[in-house]
Image (tube, rainbow, N blue to C red):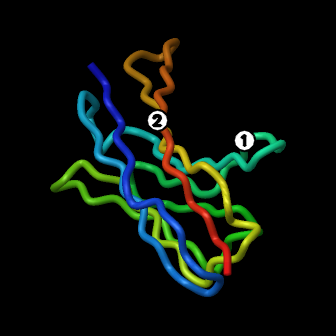
Amino acid sequence: QVQLVESGGGLVQPGGSLRLACATSGIIFRRADLAWYRQAPGKERELVASITGRGNAKYAESVKGRFSISSDNAKDTLYLQMNSLEPEDTAVYYCNARIHPTIEASYTYWGQGTQVTVSP
């Protein structure tokens, strides 16, 4: 049974920082493709950052230089360090994991989401 549990969201002032965490279970963590998405009210869900099992990371242009995605293999946990937060970063943030148990099969799993609000 795959479970993704997010934590770390909250209210922060512009320019502040937050670190989101996604604790995983039920997957081979080292072999999963992991990502953070976010969805603001009235907008589509968008990809924020992704990381492969080998540690290769990619970022959306809007967060490049401010956010950092990382994974801790010892804890099977995904992180998103968010610095220099802006009101535009306000959204529900979701942890995402993709696994490929066979050549022709792939599965996608989502966390429940955690609210990040950036406001003066």
Picture quadrant of residue 16: bottom right
Q: Is residue 102 above or below residue 75?
A: above
Q: Residue furthest right?
A: 42
Question: How many circles with numbers are drawn on the protein?
Answer: 2
Left or right: residue 64 versus residue 24 is right
Left or right: residue 103 versus residue 116 is left
Picture quadrant of residue 70: bottom left
Q: Residue furthest top?
A: 104
Residue at (64% x, 56% y) in the render: 48
Give the residue at mark 1: 45
Q: Position of residue 112 (x, y in %)?
A: 46, 35
Q: Secondary structure at mark 1?
A: loop
Q: Amino acid at mark 2?
A: Gln
Taking depth in this image into account, of 108 and 10 the one nearest to the observer is: 10
Q: Amino acid at mark 1?
A: Arg
Q: Position of residue 20 (x, y in %)?
A: 42, 61
Left or right: residue 88 versus residue 19 is right
Q: Secondary structure at mark 2?
A: loop
